[in-house]
Image (cartoon, rainbow, N blue to C red):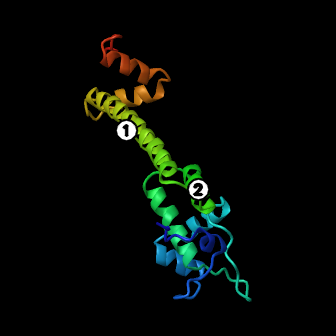
Amino acid sequence: MRRQFSPIAARKGEASSTGTPLTRGALAARTSCNIETIRYYERVGLLPPPPRSAGGHRLYGEGLVRRVNFVRRSRDLGFSIEEIRELLRLVDGGTYTCGEVEKLAGDHVREIRRKIADLRRLQRVLETMAARCSGDAVPDCPIIDVLFDPDGLSRLRASKTGHASSRAR
C-alpha cells in the first residue's frame, strides 16, 4: 500500500491543492512547534529550505506541515536528530521497507531501556544520599559532601553494596 506521506512534496515545500502556503508563524501555530525550533530544524537539514514568495517570505506547504509533525512527534518519542535524519532519509528515498524502520525503532527501544536502567541507578544513588541527610538546620550535609568529592558517588555506590565502609558522621 502506498504511504500518504509525500516526501517529494515535503522536500519541495509544495502547498496542497486544498490549502494556501503558510508563513513560518502560521506553520508554528498549526504544528504546535516553536518558531525557533522550526528554524533549528531547517538549519540542521531536517526541513528543506521552503520556497519564497515574490516578497521573500518563506512559504510552507502541506508537505512541510506533515514533515514538521513527523519530526516533532519523533522528538516526542525520544529519537535523536541523527535518528530522525535516518528515518527521513529512508522516507525521502521512497524505497524504505517496514523492516528497515522496525530495525531503527528496535535500536531506539534498546537505547531507551539502557537509559531507564541508568536512571534507576541514579535514583538509588540519590535516595541513598538523601537518606544520609539528617535534614538539620546546620551547614553540614552529606549530599553536598558527596557532590564535591570526585570519588564520592563511587564510594556511595560501594558502601551501599557493602564493599566499602561509610564515612562516619
Residue lying farthest to the front in this orientation: 1
- Within 10 Å of the Cα at label 1, are there few (<14), some (14-19), or many (20+) other Cα atoms? few
Q: How many numbered dots are placed on residues in this image?
A: 2
Label 2 – label 1 distance at C-alpha: 28 Å
- Callout 1, which amino acid? Ile
Residue shown at the point (35%, 26%) measured from the top left: 142
Mark 1 element type? helix
The percent position of residue 42, horizontal first and vertical second, equals 64, 65
Residue 12, quarter of the rendered image: bottom right
* Residue 20 picture quarter: bottom right
Residue positioned 37% across, 37% down in the render: 119
Residue under the image location 62 percent in, 79 percent down: 14
Say if residue 114 shows up in the picture.
Answer: yes
Residue beneath label 1, please? Answer: 116
Instruction: Name the one closer to the observer, 56 or 132.
Output: 56
Counting from the top left corner in percent of width and height, residue 68 is at 53, 68
Where does residue 6 sit, x and y in percent of width and height?
56, 71
The answer to which of 98 and 44 lies nearer the viewer is 98
Residue 19: numbered disc: none
Q: Which amino acid does label 2 sit on?
A: Leu
* Residue 140 in view of the camera: no
Using a 10 Å C-alpha cutoff, classify the residue at mark 2 as few (fewer than 14 neighbours), some (14 to 19) or many (20 or more). Answer: some
Would you say 168 lies left or right of 58 here? left
* Image: 10 above or below 110: below
Closer to us: 145 or 78: 78
Q: Residue 90 carries which label?
A: 2
N-terminal of the pair, mark 2 or mark 1, is: 2
Which label sits in the foreground, 2 or 1?
Answer: 2
Is residue 107 left or right of 163 when viewed as pictured? Answer: right
What secondary structure is found at the residue carrying circle 2? helix
* Residue 27 image position (x, y, % from top left): 54, 77
